[in-house]
Amino acid sequence: MQRLEYKDASHEAFKALLNTEMQVHKCGLEESLLELVKMRASQINGCAYCLDMHSKDALAEGESTTRLFVLSAWREAPHLYTDRERAALAWTEAVTRIADSGVSDEVYNEARKHFDEKAIVDLTLAVISINSWNRMAIAFHSKAGDYVSPHGKK
């Protein structure tokens, strides 16, 4: 059962997260890449609400079900993802799990092959943003399943 609706409990906190999210969406990274990043971080964190939301958004934007279904095992199916996407997914995993082992030079160097300085900072902000949303949704038991994408998919 949902504990509380955090956006109603603290408009300021919700607005701060929303402002970060808006910055992520205007930074220039591809929306399809951002949805994969959001999905992968949400898988790692176990956030049902965000998985529901971002899978619906990704499908509404034309993402394939195969790529979404296989995402948690993306290393086993490299042919389904571009080099840039794989670098972003590795970066997402490292930044999301930063307490476990930091971010290795190997992961950083691979990411830098595909992202310039601005883009790697923007990608990092995207990972930070979804991790923040995950923590809010998980902490307050946001209910998965009711999200309707802007394209009308439930």
Image: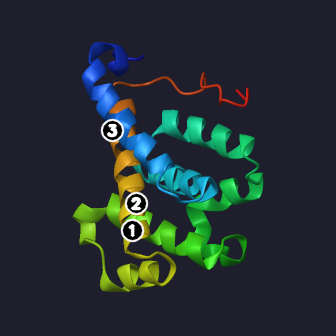
How far apart are labels 1 and 3 at the CA level?
26 Å
Residue 55 x %, y %: 63, 43
* Snapshot colouring: rainbow
Does residue 50 appear to the left or right of 12 in the view shown? right
Mark 1 highlights which residue? 118
Mark 1 and mark 3 lie on one chain; the one further toward the N terminus is: 1
Q: Is residue 116 above or below residue 123?
A: below
Badge 2: how crowded within 10 Å, few (<14), some, or many (20+)? many
Q: Inspect the image, locate mark 2, and give the three-letter code of the amino acid beneath it.
A: Asp
Which residue is drawn at the image coordinates 47% and 75% (left, top)?
Answer: 115
Q: Are marks 2 and 1 in contact (CB under 8 Å)?
A: yes
| Disc 3 residue type (three-letter) | Arg
Mark 2 — residue? 122
Percent across and percent down for residue 69 are 68, 54
Between the C-alphas of marks 3 and 2, the distance is 20 Å
Question: Which structural element holds mark 3?
Answer: helix
Q: Position of residue 54 (x, y in %)?
A: 58, 42
Instruction: Give the residue displayed 72% in from the left and 77% down from the top.
Output: 79
Tag nearer the camera, 1 or 3: 1
Within 10 Å of disc 3 (Cα), the crowding (few <14, some 14-19, many 20+) is: some
Q: Where on the picture, by quarter, is residue 120?
A: bottom left
The quarter of the picture where the N terminus appears is: top left
- Where, by quadrant of the figure, is residue 108 drawn? bottom left
Residue receiving disc 3: 135
Q: Is residue 62 above or below residue 148?
A: below
Q: Nearer the viewer, mark 3 or mark 2?
A: 2
